[in-house]
């Protein structure tokens, strides 16, 4: 082997070793730039040229990695939901007592949406699209399975310990947790104007967090029979209050 060959081989090896890393970094930069564009401008308003410029990436590479604008948009959705689901798994809810686990999930969901308000814009955009892009992603559906399984496990343990009611649907419960954590953020400005109160104020948010915990946990720990009795009583009262015809 000549000296020239010895010097050239490490160089070629280094270049080959850098390419996967450079490719991953470029993809990551494109995803971050695309997340910004889609969150701020929606699917229709985002421009692929602006995304490439923000990512300092070649347009040819962008299309090679993600196919087209819709492919990039789906990749952003998958990336966002991967982040949410990964953060939920780091909570290790199965290691906590049932009430503590549920309280932790509520608190995490509340905090996450408060700290990632740009994601709310993205989710609202996909709702305007009637979820048709998310339906194209098997990954997002697969990511959701461990969350549902974890909630089911918490509920089973809570029922076995005599802490939780036994008639709870895990998806209904999670939708309620999300609603309590999401709505005041997504509708912050209209609600603030309506009630002449800043829903972004830290004191208001602290009380809202306590309210979310109380609403979910009080319902979750109520006996099913007690709830049905109260519901029947409320309906009877409502009927008695109606004027006769």
Image (cartoon, rainbow, N blue to C red):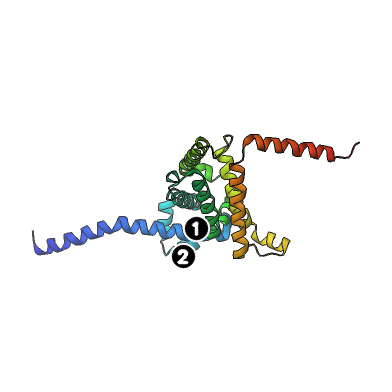
Q: Which element carries disc 2, helix, strand or loop?
A: helix
Q: Position of residue 136 (x, y in %)?
A: 51, 42
**Earlier sequence position, callout 1 versus callout 2:** 1
**239 vs 141, nearest the viewer:** 239
Residue 233 shows up from this direction = yes
**129 vs 61, nearest the viewer:** 129
Q: Position of residue 104 (x, y in %)?
A: 50, 50
Identified at 88% across, 40% down, the residue is 243
**48 vs 77, nearest the viewer:** 77
The mark closer to the camera, 1 or 2, is 1
Q: Position of residue 25 (x, y in %)?
A: 37, 59
Q: Which element carries disc 1, helix, strand or loop?
A: helix
Q: Quadrant of residue 62?
A: bottom left
Classed neighbour count for the residue bearing mark 1: other residues with Cα under 10 Å, few (<14), some (14–19), many (≥20) = many
Residue bearing the label numbered 2: 54
Classed neighbour count for the residue bearing mark 2: other residues with Cα under 10 Å, few (<14), some (14–19), many (≥20) = some
Residue 130 shows up from this direction = no
Residue bearing the label numbered 1: 35
**Image-based side of 22 in relation to 92, left or right:** left
């Amino acid at each position: 082997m000549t000296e020239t060959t010895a010097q050239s081989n490490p160089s070629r090896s280094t270049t080959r070793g850098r390419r996967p890393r450079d490719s991953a970094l470029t993809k990551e930069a494109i995803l971050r730039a695309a997340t910004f564009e889609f969150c701020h401008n929606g699917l229709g308003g985002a421009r692929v040229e602006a995304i490439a410029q923000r990512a300092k990436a070649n347009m040819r590479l962008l299309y090679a990695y993600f196919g087209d604008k819709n492919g990039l948009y789906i990749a952003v959705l998958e990336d966002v939901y991967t982040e949410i689901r990964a953060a939920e798994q780091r909570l290790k809810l199965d290691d906590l007592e049932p009430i503590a686990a549920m309280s932790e999930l509520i608190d995490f969901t509340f905090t996450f949406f408060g700290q990632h308000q740009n994601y709310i814009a993205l989710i609202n955009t996909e709702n305007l699209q009637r979820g048709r892009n998310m339906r194209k992603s098997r990954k997002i559906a697969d990511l959701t399975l461990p969350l549902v399984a974890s909630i089911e496990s918490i509920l089973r343990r809570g029922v076995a310990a005599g802490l939780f009611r036994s008639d709870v649907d895990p998806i209904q419960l999670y939708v309620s947790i999300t609603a309590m954590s999401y709505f005041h953020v997504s509708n912050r400005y209209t609600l603030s104007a309506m009630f002449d109160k800043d829903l972004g104020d830290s004191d208001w948010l602290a009380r809202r967090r306590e309210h979310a915990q109380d609403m979910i946990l009080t319902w979750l720990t109520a006996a099913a029979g007690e709830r049905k009795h109260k519901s029947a009583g409320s309906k009877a009262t409502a009927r008695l209050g109606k004027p006769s015809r």
